[in-house]
Image (cartoon, rainbow, N blue to C red):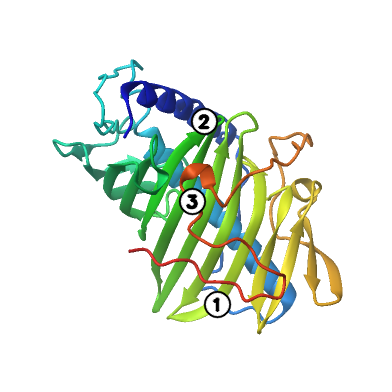
C-alpha cells in the first residue's frame, strides 16, 4: 500500500515526468499515416519498414495513454495543489484535465470519462478506468485497467477501441509502465487488431521514452506483422529511436532493424536478413527535430524488472528464435 508520504513523492515526481513529456511534445515530429488497411509485406525491406512505423505508432499511443492515466493523479495527494492528503491505503483521486468531464466512484476506483476528454496528442477519448493499489508493482505502485474509445488521430472524428492493463511505478526519476494493450479498429469491411505487451519507460532528465516488448498486427484475424522491440530509446518529440533493434518475423525467418545515433536526423536504419545487410531510408518526415543533433547516451535499463512491475513479455532470445506473441488483454 501507499502511505501519504509515498503518495506525495510519487505524485510530485510523476508530475515532473509528465511536464517534461508535454514540453517535448510541443515540437513533436509527425509520423505519417499508415495505409488504410495494412498489407502483408512481400520483402524483408517492406517488413522492416512496416515494423518500424508500427513501433512509432505504438510509442505515440503508449505516451498518450501513459500521460493521460498518470497525469490524472498528479497534485491530488501529499500536499500538492488541491491535494486532499488522503490516508494510508487510500486510492489517489483522479483529476480530469481541463475541459474533460469525469464521473468518479465514491471509493475512487472507477472513473467514467465523457466524450469531451482529449489526450496529449489532441485525440478525443472517452471510456472507463479501473484503478488499484500495488498489484504486480507492489508497494508504491498503481494498476489501471482501461477500456477507451480514441480517435485514430487528432481531428479524424472516428473511434478506435483501446483496452488494456498497466502497472505504473516511479524509480530514479523515471515512470515505468508495464503494459498489455489491445487496439481494435474497423477499416471499411476489414477488422484490424494490434496487440502490444512490454515495458515502457518515460525518463524525466533526458525527456525520452524507451520500449522493450512485442507487437502483433492482424487484419481479419490473419497475422500481418509480428515483431520484438529490444531496448528502443528515443526522444519524445522525435519520430525514430537513436538506439535499439527490432526483430520482425518474415516468412519463417527474422529480419533485424538496427537504429543508430544518426537515425533520428537521417531516417536511415540498417536492415539485416541472414547474411545480407542493407541501409534503408524510412518514409518519415524529419523536420523540426527537438534534439538539434544532440543525441543523449543510451540508458542502461532493467526491462525485466520494469521498475518492480515486471515486464509482461519474456526477454529477447537468440536472433533466430521464434518471436513470442504479445500477451492477451484479460
Few, some or many C-alpha atoms within 10 Å of disc 3 (few <14, some 14-19, many ≥20)?
many
Label 3: state its secondary structure. Answer: loop
x, y percent for residue 158 = 37, 58
Return the x and y of residue 94 as percentages of the image width and height.
28, 33
The residue at which mark 1 appears reads as 224
Q: Residue at x 41, y 62 (%)?
A: 183
Q: Is residue 71 left or right of residue 57?
A: left
Quadrant of the frame with the C terminus? bottom left
Q: Is residue 205 left or right of residue 150?
A: right
Give the mark toward the camera: 1 or 2: 2
Q: Residues within 10 Å of mark 1 (few under 14, many from 20)?
A: some
Per the model, the C-alpha gap separating discs 1 and 2 is 35 Å
Q: Nearer the viewer, residue 163 or 199?
A: 199
What is the residue that sits farthest to the left in this orientation? 106
Contact (Cβ within 8 Å) of mark 1 with mark 2: no
> What label sits on residue 17 in the rendered view?
2
Look at 61% across and 64% down and name the residue there.
228
Q: Which mark is residue 310?
A: 3
- Residue at 86 percent across and 76 percent down: it is 275
Looking at marks 3 and 1 on the same chain, the residue that comes earlier in the sequence is marked by 1
How far across and down, in percent of the image, does residue 89 sit? 25, 32
Amino acid at each position: 500500500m501507499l502511505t501519504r508520504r509515498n503518495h506525495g513523492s510519487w505524485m510530485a515526481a510523476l508530475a515532473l515526468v509528465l511536464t517534461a513529456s508535454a514540453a517535448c511534445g510541443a515540437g513533436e515530429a509527425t509520423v505519417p499515416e499508415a495505409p488504410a488497411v495494412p498489407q502483408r509485406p512481400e520483402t524483408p525491406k517492406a517488413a522492416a519498414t512496416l515494423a518500424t512505423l508500427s513501433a512509432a505508432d505504438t510509442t505515440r499511443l503508449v505516451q498518450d495513454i501513459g500521460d493521460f492515466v498518470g497525469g490524472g493523479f498528479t497534485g491530488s495527494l501529499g500536499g500538492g495543489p488541491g491535494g486532499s492528503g488522503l490516508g494510508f491505503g487510500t486510492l489517489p483521486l483522479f483529476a480530469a484535465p481541463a475541459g474533460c468531464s469525469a464521473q468518479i466512484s465514491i471509493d475512487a476506483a472507477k472513473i467514467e470519462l465523457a466524450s469531451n476528454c482529449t489526450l496529449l496528442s489532441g485525440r478525443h477519448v472517452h471510456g472507463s478506468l479501473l484503478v488499484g493499489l500495488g498489484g504486480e508493482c507492489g508497494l508504491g505502485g498503481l494498476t489501471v485497467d482501461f477500456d477507451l474509445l480514441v480517435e485514430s488521430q487528432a481531428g479524424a472524428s472516428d473511434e478506435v477501441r483501446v483496452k488494456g492493463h498497466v502497472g505504473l511505478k516511479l524509480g530514479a526519476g523515471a515512470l515505468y509502465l508495464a503494459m498489455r494493450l489491445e487496439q481494435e479498429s474497423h477499416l471499411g469491411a476489414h477488422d484490424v487488431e494490434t496487440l502490444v505487451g512490454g515495458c515502457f519507460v518515460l525518463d524525466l532528465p533526458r525527456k525520452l521514452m524507451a520500449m522493450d516488448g512485442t507487437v502483433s498486427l492482424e487484419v481479419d484475424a490473419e497475422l500481418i506483422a509480428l515483431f520484438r522491440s529490444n531496448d528502443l530509446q528515443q526522444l519524445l518529440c522525435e519520430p525514430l529511436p537513436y538506439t535499439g533493434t527490432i526483430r520482425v518475423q518474415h516468412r519463417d525467418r527474422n529480419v533485424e532493424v538496427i537504429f543508430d545515433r544518426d537515425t533520428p536526423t537521417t531516417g536511415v536504419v540498417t536492415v539485416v536478413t541472414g547474411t545480407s545487410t542493407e541501409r534503408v531510408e524510412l518514409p518519415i518526415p524529419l523536420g523540426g527535430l527537438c534534439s538539434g543533433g544532440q543525441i543523449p547516451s543510451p540508458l542502461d535499463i532493467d526491462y525485466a524488472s520494469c521498475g518492480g512491475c515486471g515486464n509482461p513479455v519474456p526477454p529477447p532470445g537468440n536472433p533466430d528464435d521464434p518471436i513470442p506473441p504479445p500477451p492477451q488483454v484479460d
